[in-house]
Amino acid sequence: MEREGRAVGAASGELVTIGEFARLSRLSAKALRRYDELGLLRPALVDPVNGYRYYDPAQAEEARLVAWLRRIGMPLSRIGRVVALDAGAAAVEIRAYWARVEAETAARRDLAMYLVDHLSAEGRAMARIPGSTGSAGSAGSAGGTESAGRAGAGPLAIRCAALTDTGVVRTANQDAAFAGPRLLAVADGFGEGGAEASAAAIEAFKPSAWGSAGGAPSAADLLNALEDTADSASRAVREAVASCAAPDGSGTTLTAMLWTGSRLGLVHIGDSRAYLLRAGELFRITHDHSLVQSMIDDGSLSREEAASHPQRALLLKALVGEARSAQVAVASRPDVRLQEVLAGDRYLLCSDGLSAVVDEADLRAAVVAADGPEEAVRRLVGLVREAGGPDNVACAVADVVVEE
């Protein structure tokens, strides 16, 4: 095979052998053969007699791009799509991929920190038990804060309401909302099967809202239940849109809260949002899984610019159908975590038909002014319609109260 390491003779003039091309691209011949087998980088010519591979020197940049994408961990199937795009579209696709990696890393970091705090709190509790060999851990656990915040108070419950509206411009409503004593959820469907997808996602969570006869689950059991139900929701959405002409172009966002009577579990994917009103201050407690949010995070885009960005609707994570050529960069596993709960909290879940249309100051004013959840959701939908109602809107509001 040494002949593969020598340049093609004057008869060809333009192509080089795999050995020469390996030097040009700074890749090994073995890697180039592998890229050929995977369809990522085909030789310009394969000799039909001896099977030798010949490359155009202009392919060196493409070969290096494949190698770089491999180094950042991009899956081979996605690399194949990226190298087929023009430079501008490839840049957008790479940005979307990396934003998804960072979002998933952040979600794993948050879960890891929660587990450290939770296990540290269990260690402190064990240390207070006579005869226990447990040692005290670091302060600041979610479980410890929850208990402290409720010290001296009676059992907590939630009072809630949900409302969805087609809006002024759209003719069909693909948003869904649900509010019950155990479950609060909103979903924003998109594509041909958007309405079916949003309904299926929320329906998959309803059995979990019933709780268990044995009482409230532990933090670990709740996290496991949320993970399992999130997987069920993903399957339900795929089944709901399977009959669509392009199932991978249909799907939904989902933001849901599961109330166990002592803990609140949060499941989130997409750009629907959850807010917390506490002591008069409104906090957003979810992070949008969108391209513009990733650009805000890395400083390349301001919040003001994001509002009018041409790709503001591009999602990095969503529950979708078959994920082959969808417009979203799909990661079908939602973020899952536990939320600190205090009496007097008010939670708002909403689709971007509200958050992208109503200014956050006006949103806060409406949530603060409402006497209860029913009035809050009516006020919020009213604000959307006053602003022109360009999109469907779904919202759900829950108050945490001391149970009488």
Image (tube, helix red, strand yellow):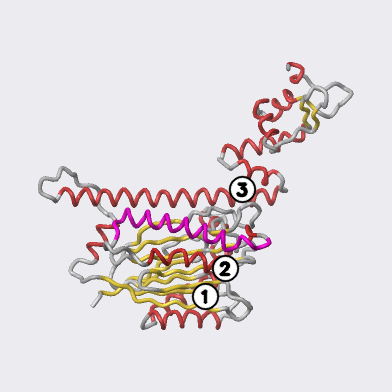
Give residue 228's quadrant in the image: bottom left
Task: Give coordinates of residue 285: x percent, y percent.
Answer: 41, 63
At mark 3, the secondary structure is: helix
Residue 210 sits above or below residue 373 on the image: above
Depth order, front residue of 215/78: 215
Residue 16 at x, y = what percent?
Answer: 79, 26
Residue at image coords 65%, 63%: 244
**Disc 1 residue type?**
Val
**The C terminus - image quarter:** bottom left
Side (left or right) of 324 relative to 186: right
User: Neighbour class for label 1 at 10 Å: few (<14), some, many (≥20)?
Assistant: many
The tag on residue 94 is: 3
Q: Quadrant of the N terminus?
A: top right
Read off the residue under disc 1: 358
Which mark is in front, 2 or 1?
2
Residue at the outermost top position:
2
Q: First in sequence: mark 3 or mark 2?
A: 3
- Mark 2 is on which residue type? Glu
* Alpha carbon distance from label 3 to label 1: 31 Å
Residue 230: image quadrant is bottom left
Against 201, residue 124 (above or below) is: above
Where is residue 322 drawn, in percent x and y? 61, 55
The span shown in magenta is 217-245
Going by the image, does 349 lie left or right of 210?
right
Is 224 situated above or below 351?
Answer: above
Residue 35, position as x, y percentages in the image = 67, 34
At label 2, counting other C-alpha atoms closer than 10 Å, the crowd grade (few under 14, some 14-19, many 20 or more) is: many
